[in-house]
Amino acid sequence: MNEQLRLYSYWRSSAAYRVRIGLNLKGLRYETVPVHLVRDGGEQHAPEYREKNPQELVPILQHGNRTMRQSMAILEYLDETWPDTPLLPATARERARARSLAQAIACDVHPLNNLRVLQFLEHSWGVPQAERDEWVRHWIVEGFQAVEAMLAGHVSTGEFCEGDLPTIADCCLVPQIYNARRFSVDMTQFPTIARIEAACLALPAFDAARPERQPDCPQAAAG
Amino acid sequence: MNEQLRLYSYWRSSAAYRVRIGLNLKGLRYETVPVHLVRDGGEQHAPEYREKNPQELVPILQHGNRTMRQSMAILEYLDETWPDTPLLPATARERARARSLAQAIACDVHPLNNLRVLQFLEHSWGVPQAERDEWVRHWIVEGFQAVEAMLAGHVSTGEFCEGDLPTIADCCLVPQIYNARRFSVDMTQFPTIARIEAACLALPAFDAARPERQPDCPQAAAG
């Protein structure tokens, strides 16, 4: 349990951002190993990183001699290994709802807009920047419309996505909103999502996980 | 616990296929409610379905008066509610590996090739069939290369993805291979994946979940 935690991260990766929130909520200390996703064609494609993660994606979490991949699997691992400050609610039914909200983002929004997809659209198909940005917005808006409908007025929605404590759903939602703002999505369409974002970012665990607080954030963006 | 289980499914949906495998592995009886994803512009877009799932996707699982969305969240719910014949292995470390393999497919392969994405490429961008098929194959091959690397020679890989019992990873892998074959991906590149597929399909739980065994499979495909 006291083995060192090491997070391979990139400041602007929303999948890494999810795990940073989870680690912070549990009060776990960890070392950040920055993996620059753009410089030199992307450090995630270097042989020594590919050996750790054949998917060539961030984040990975090392716990002692264990290497874990996939942000959602990592969050579940954190929750099982350090059950204090749970990232999942108490009942199977509530957990199903929290996980389904998380996955509505982690499966159906984020992967479509990931760097590797945008690079494919640019380099293989020559899709211009404006259309790529449209593509990103399209999937965020479609996803957020569904998530807003699942949250607004639902009896289980509280201060956070599921009840009054942050869960895995909030760990996924907040980084996706960061991406939405980056691509100028109008968040006033999604009042429940925006309200929950504000509640989350008021917590030190979320605030410290923000991209602009990361050691590898360029000074200009940290501003 | 004895409340009725009802799965909103489409025979060829690989996300629904995952849940069918999970239900069968646990020996749970369920009613299939077919949702035709293509006919009449897609029954998943009808107002009465959208009310059940604002994401307008299959599957959803109803358990009594509960409606659950997202195949991975549903599989976790099944495992928590009916712990016999577990879909997750015994230790946190093994569970992290099983989940990460599952999510390498459920997050990073399948959503890119989903019907709604292919429809967007066709209708919004006018991408021709041949390029759309290339797109599908590209993401399957990239994903399977990583999954094959994570499986081949790993000490935890057994008869199945993680150990000698089927897990959530196999529930995701087998439906994705079905898609791969549909798009003529050469599976001889992925010998470990193909070996595990054969082990899975030899089990009645996997066999009964196959698209061509579903009540809504057209006779020609069931052939």
Image: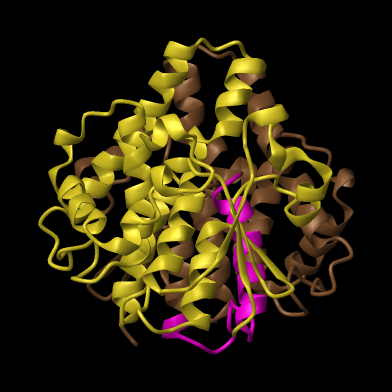
Chain colours: A yellow, B brown
Residue B1, percent across and down?
A: 34, 87
Residue B140, percent across and down?
A: 69, 40
**Image point 14% across, 34% down: which residue?**
A188
Check the picture and name the quadrant holding the N terminus of chain A: bottom right
Residue A23 belongs to magenta span: no
Residue B96 belongs to magenta span: yes
In-front residue for pair A192/B193: A192
Magenta-highlighted residues: B80-108
**Image point 21% across, 62% down: which residue?**
A160
In-front residue for pair B13/A76: A76
From what the image shows, is residue A144 above or below residue B173?
above
Residue B141 located left or right of residue B189: left
Q: Quadrant of residue A35?
A: top right
Residue B129 located left or right of residue B42: right
Residue A123 located left or right of residue A50: left
Residue A81 located left or right of residue B138: left
**Image point 62% across, 41% down: which residue?**
B220
Residue A14, percent across and down?
A: 46, 46
